[in-house]
Image (cartoon, rainbow, N blue to C red):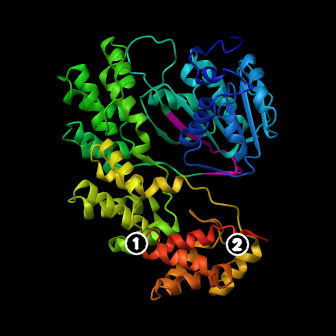
Amino acid sequence: MQGREHFNTEDVVQDRYVLDPAQPDEAFLTSGRQDVEQWVIDGIRLESTAAVLEIGCGSGRLLIHMAPRVALAHGVDESERLIQESLTFTSTIPNLCMKTLAGNLDDYFDDSFDFVYVFDLFQKATSAAAILRYVHAAARVLRPGGIFRFRLNGQWQVKGDHGTITFSPDSLRQLIAGTPLVVIEEWGVETYDHWVTARKASGRPKARLGVRGRVYDQTHLTNIFFRMGCQDGAAIASAIVRGQCGLRRAISSDERQMADFPVDEFITEAYRAILCRLPDRDGFEFYKGLLNDKAIDRSTFLADLLINGARDFIFPLRPEIPWWRLEIILQNFPDAIQHRRLLVVDPQIFFFKLVDIITDQVKTLPPADAWCMIYERVFGSTPDPLVMARELEFQNHLAGDLRLIIRNLLLNPVREVTPPSRPPRNKIESMAERMGIVLSEDTLLQIGESFPGESLMGRALLRDGAAYDNLTFVRRAYELILGRPADPGGEAFYVNELTSPRLSRPELLRQFFWGEEIRLA
């Protein structure tokens, strides 16, 4: 392969997916989108006018999913072959540009980008100097306040020469010394997936992005350590949350708790404790081979599982509970109302308090009854039998981790929904006027809204209609949202849905607010 003399590219992810650039396969597209959403921009809000740069872009597997989010998406790579092959399926994307560069970013001016990222190139580095050049170059091309996110191999404690550069917490600090970069977040410390998020701190911030710091679900992390047999699980989890200890170092004591287990039992119990499931056959055989060959030690294996399960205990600062879901929850779990002010002050703490409140109310019930009660009180409706069967199977898959089930139920349905386009401004103003609500030009779009002010209107309708029967509530929704009387068919349908109950009042309003009729000019 041409170029990249300081990087081991034999197993670089991008290379594996370039099978036919003219017709990239589904794995290429799906994996790129997932990696962008789950790792690259998790917790980062890019404005539509932002400019981003990927260092080590390979075939553009990630960039084709970054481009629709921003104004400019650039990528550089030292492999001319990959750049040329990618042009077949990236040339039609007008705001995407990829070019071949060898170890520098000299083609770009200072303060050119809002966000720069490296996905896996640094993990393949055989030269610390090569990484250092890119770090300094990234700091130069970032705008003040811009973010540089990258991933390093943090397995500095693992014995043996694997031919690539590893970084300890101290050597990471040396890497960015002399640059205007300041580390604002890192996780996976001392593992193969050590993620670093750094901000360019010099000058007045100009970058067109925002950062929501990710934090640990301390209770869930504590439960993991307890399941691993560690009596100091709460103290260890607390130390991780406070940044006093990395994941790998923390689990060294847990390795000793399971030291006498045969390899097969050790792998199985580790999966149960950390991922709340049994290992799949491929994963089991893969790790068994590595452990038997002493290619990795047990602490490294445990840390690897923790990183794979990181989505279970690391969250963006602002959990995405939309207004219609929250109204149902507060109605059915009144103990949470006293914490509502935290939605503004610290939404993360509110979310975890809510999870704990729900857990306490259902933890003594049989699994099926517990799940049904949670569903009805979170969604305000009776679960479909097929949905219930699927979720109960998932609950068994999670080995009865009720708190994790509740947390996923609160969040997952929201992430699958994309709001439609905004209604015309005059339609929004007419709705607000009919409801006696004043919207200003500064009214911002909130989580779970399809237009600014939707949650204000929804809560007003729920409050004013609390004493209405279902028929009157449906008629008022038609009149105030759509500005017309209910048609007989629609009226009968929604009354039946509310009475069954397959639909809650907040969700009915959400269907009206998100419907096509109010979006017609």
> Which residues, given as a range, are shown in magenta?
195-210
Please indicate whether residue 496 sits to the left or right of residue 88 in the image.
left
- Please determine whether, in this image, residue 419 is positioned above or below residue 399: below
Q: Position of residue 181 (x, y in %)?
A: 61, 39
Q: Quadrant of residue 98?
A: top right
What amino acid does circle 2 point to? Ile
Image position, residue 38 (x, y; %): 53, 41
In the rendered image, the quadrant that contains the N terminus is: top right
- Residue at 42% across / 72% down in the picture? 500
Query: Could you tell which of marks 1 and 2 lies nearer the N-terminus?
Result: 1
Residue 338 image position (x, y, % from top left): 36, 74
> Dot 1: few (<14), some (14–19), or many (≥20) neighbours within 10 Å?
some
Q: Nearer the viewer, mark 1 or mark 2?
A: 2
Three-letter amino acid code at disc 1?
Leu
State the separation of the CA atoms marked 1 and 2: 28 Å
Q: Which mark is residue 330?
A: 1
Is residue 339 shown left or right of residue 258? right
Task: Note whether 198 is above or below 427 in the view shown.
Answer: above
Is 268 or 103 nearer to us in this picture? 268
Instruction: Name the residue rendered at 28%, 26% in the picture.
Output: 267
Q: Secondary structure at mark 2?
A: helix
Residue drawn at x 57%, y 27% is: 120
